[in-house]
Amino acid sequence: MDLGNIGRLLIAAAVLLLVLGGLFLLLGRFGLDRLPGDLVFRRGNFTVYFPIGLMILLSVVGTIVLNVLLRR
C-alpha cells in the first residue's frame, strides 16, 4: 500500500467522522440523545451513561445502508 492510498483512506475517514459528528449534533437538538433503552446510573457526582438504545438504532441503520450500498 503506497502513501497515496493511505492518505485517501485517512481523508475519507475524516469526512465520515465529520458527517457522523454533525448527525449526532442534529440528533441532540431534536431530543434523540436519550432514547428508550438507554441506561443512566447516578451516584453523587458520578454518572455512567450506557446508550444501548442509540447503539441498536445506529446498528440497524448502518446494516440497512451497507446492505443497500454493497449489494451485488
Image: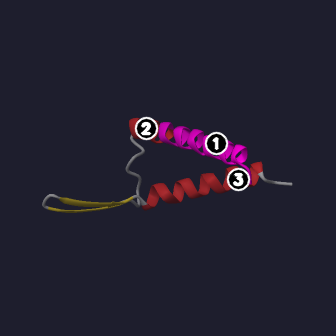
Kindly report which numbered mark, 3 or 1, lies closer to the viewer in this rendering: 1
The residue wearing badge 1 is 12
Q: Which residue is more in the foreground, 70 or 17?
A: 17
Q: Residues within 10 Å of mark 1 (few under 14, many from 20)?
A: few
Disc 2 residue type (three-letter): Leu
Disc 1 residue type (three-letter): Ala
Q: Residues within 10 Å of mark 3 (few under 14, many from 20)?
A: few
Magenta segment boundaries in residue numbering: 1-22
Q: Secondary structure at mark 1?
A: helix
Instruction: Kindly report the secondary structure that dominates the magenta region of the rendered protein.
Output: helix
**Residue at far left of view:** 44
Q: Where is residue 24 shown, x and y percent of the image?
A: 46, 42
The residue wearing badge 3 is 66
Disc 3 residue type (three-letter): Leu
Q: Which residue is more in the foreground, 17 or 66?
A: 17
| Quadrant assignment, res 49 | bottom left
Q: Where is residue 17 shown, x and y percent of the image?
A: 54, 43
Is residue 27 a member of the stretch shown in magenta? no
**Residue at far front of view:** 2
Kindly report the distance in space between the C-alpha atoms of the residues bearing marks 3 and 1. 16 Å
